[in-house]
Amino acid sequence: MEAVHADEFTVEAVERALQQLYYDPDMEQKNVAQKWLTQAQASPQAWHFCWALLRPDKVPEIQFFGASTLHAKISRHWSELPQGQLDSLRSQLIAQVGQLASGSKMVLTRLCVALASLVLHVLPKTWPTAVPDLLCAFQTEESVTEAGGQARCLALLELLSVLPEELQSSRIPASRRSQLRSALAVDWSSVCSLLQHLLQRPDAPSPVRERVLRCVSSWLTLDIALKDSEGLLESCFALLKESEMFDTAVETIVSIISQPDCQRFADSLLKVVPQVLDLQEQLKKAVQDGDMETSHGICRIAVALGETHCRTLLEQVDHWQGFQALVSMIMSCTGTPGHYPVDETSSSLTLTFWYTLQDDVTSLDAERQTLYLQIYRPVYFQLVDVLLQKACFPRDEEYAGWSADDKEQFRTYRVDISDTLMYVYELLGPELLRNLYDKLGTLLTDTTHPSSWQDIEALLFGFQSIAETVDVSYSDVIPGLIGLIPLITANNLQLAETIMFTIGSLAEWLADHSLMLANVLPVVLHGLSKPDLSVACVSALKRICRECRHDLHLHTSDIMAVSQAVLVKDIHKALGFLLSALPRDEILGKLLSLVTPHIQQLEKLASEPPSSANKLPVVHILGLLSNLFSTFDLNKQSQRLEVMRPVQTQPHNDNPVVVVLQQAFPLIQTILSKWLNEPDVVEAVCAVFEKSLKTLLHDFAPLVTQLCELIGQMFGAYPQASALDLTRQLVHIFGCEKDLFSPILALLELITNITMSIFHLGSRDHPDVVESFMQLHAQVLRRKADLYLSDRLDIKAVFYCGILSFKFPETPTLKATCLLFTELISHCEEIPAVREVLQEDGKLLLQTLLEAIGGQSPRSLAEHFAEVLFSVSRNCPSMLSVWLREALLPPGFPSSHLTTEHKEHFCQQILREQVSKRRMKDIVKEFALLSRGLQGTECAANY
């Protein structure tokens, strides 16, 4: 369509445009029609042509556009309505809803939304009786069982349903929204009477009752009091007996009783309890018949009541028996027969209820707490039995037939049960462990009743769930458990895995009881030889080696022998813990015996021409070495790198890892010379040195010069983020070492020059390199800012790279850039080059920053941009005043949504703020919203 004048927004033109929009195969023509129709809807003529489009002889697509146009005019262009036209519009709209009640559902809904929007404009002052008037307007002499009567009834119910929904979705100021909610809530009694009457009519068709329930759910968003809906709720419970109404009735009941405000009406809640308890027979039959939908729905109702109002019901001490019966009903839901999720889906719904009940009981006053603990401690012991039964694996042949999705859901379900058991332990204490131990002992020693592996696994799973997070050092049953574990015949993968995870969870206890290691280590080492168990065994061994490293001297040879035979990647993390705890004169020999086969294999691979076949083993072996060195900590220091002080520790020149790395260095250089353009190999090499650095700290000093040269070669051949991250670790640890100043400075100079060339050639394809480059220079500024006093390191070039980096869309890159500038600006006094570049191009920085804040970058980054502005405000206040006003001078910059007053207010706020970083962040967030035209919207409220 070609552009048209406003006087050409006629019915005929609109219909032609709709024909083009719906049926023209040309996408470009569809877009033109869409744009034209949007203009038509916004025009004053739309108040007139919309009615013509709604005539009964029009097809539904055209009628729908007419109804949508009417809604758009009422909701967005209300001020265009001529004075005195409200009554006419209201009457016409009500009549139109009545005429089209039997027509297209989507058209009727849209008309009802338009009428709802009108009501919200005029309620309560102009049309205070809107809801009662509408109820009267759609009353009919015809029965709801007749076509005409049913259509008008459904139209009224649709209107009543969309009225609260339109209130929720409309952009209305909070004060006005609150006024409208109160006005509509006043009319709930008359609406409720109608809805209850329709539900109780035996001849009411299912579509009418379905719509009634939807209407109830809609009005609940107005915080209707439970005491005002008691009769309606009772009618909903009655509908649970009808299969076609069951699902909708469940949703409505859950919505009603889940309202938090119900807690104010304890008497009404107490009336609901027997209604829920009356569902137990229906629940029992559903479980017997395998009717998962019905049992799931009833379970939802019981849990909704118990979980939402647990505290209120507990406080009604005189009615404790009713609440106890509800708890028993929920327990039966937790213990629904069958395996989740194949046979039942109800039990998972109940787990959070048990958390709530425990919290509420233990937070009551002393007298009531004592009473309820007498009642509910036995219930929680019963719960543990039920949960362990639910955690049992099915029979092997049955489990083999489960889909991958079912198995994953069951795994997640067991994790939830594990969390619940851990929480329940806080209530039941050591008695729970004693209970589990007695049952496990009985299963393993009672020869008259052979036990299944599933029952044994479930009890070990219970132990592991508790020991994983709870300190069990004082428990008197753990020695017995350690003694029982070797008696278990692990003839099943799931059982064997649980044994390993249980042993791993007891590693801290074993560190205090090292004599017991001899009981469990053979179990773990035996499992290492089985490929299916490697992950669980390595996890257990790693935890034992970490916690018990100083008590494993007698077992070192056995562990080393088995570990070298299986070559599982993560096992080297365990060996790192183990070896670093040996006497110092034994470490090097053991370490060399462990790594020499890998070094020899690397030498063989290095002598072969590079190929995809030998790249994988190269990366794999480098990964083994990385894992080994990451846990090899002679200084007993944490793997997490803390902020270092200059010359905090004296390096050990005989560190075994340093010796191995020095011997392997020529080989690594040879590998790199062949694989220098292969990112995976370069990254694996960097990981070896980075993990060694983090563990060795200052002991790494003898390798720094060689490593700087190697990084320079890597980055020069193929710039990669991993090389920059490794350099950042070097700066972090050795930035203040005078003896290593020269090689680190030379490496920084080389890396900076190479990265400059990347920016010149086009850095857009390397956001990870740019991010790491920004982080590296931020680290240099933080640890060794005087490196920039050298003429060899061009801080001005880094500044301009940072300016370009603000144009990147990637969030991590932008965060790193903000970090760089925050650090850089804070050094403007002591580094002349920083001061000079800010004097020359501080305005450019402000312009770039404002452009990013004003819409170019994600709003979530506003806090990081505020950090940079705060740094400028603190360190360059006089220059900021000039830069900021000059940068904001051009009209429409950084956004067309900003007025001159907005900009001036922003300047005043920024220039005043030199103390509170939090306040600066609020200022920048507000400016970002203004720039996007979002201030005062719902989006802004969530920002």
Image: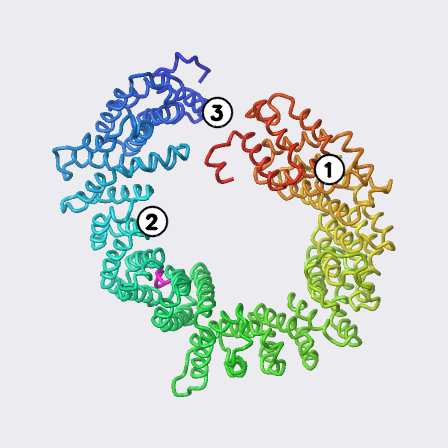
| Tag shown at residue 28 | 3
> Dots 2 and 3: beta carbons under 8 Å?
no
Q: Secondary structure at mark 3?
A: helix
Query: What residue is shown with label 2?
Result: 261
Q: Nearer the viewer, mark 1 or mark 3?
A: 1
Residue bounds of the magenta highlight:
341-347
Report the residue marked by disc 1.
875
Comes first in the chain, label 2 or label 3: 3
Q: Residue at x 63, y 29 (%)?
A: 908
Residue visible at 27% across and 66% down in the picture? 321
Amino acid residing under circle 2 = Asp
Q: Earlier in the sequence, mark 1 or mark 3?
A: 3
Whether residue 27 is situated above or below residue 353 in the rendered picture: above
Question: Whole-percent x and y of residue 849?
Answer: 66, 33
Identify residue type, mark 1.
Answer: Asn
Considering only vertical position in the picture, is 918 above or below 556? above
Taking depth in this image into account, of 716 and 750 the one nearest to the observer is 750
* Magenta stretch secondary structure, dominant: loop
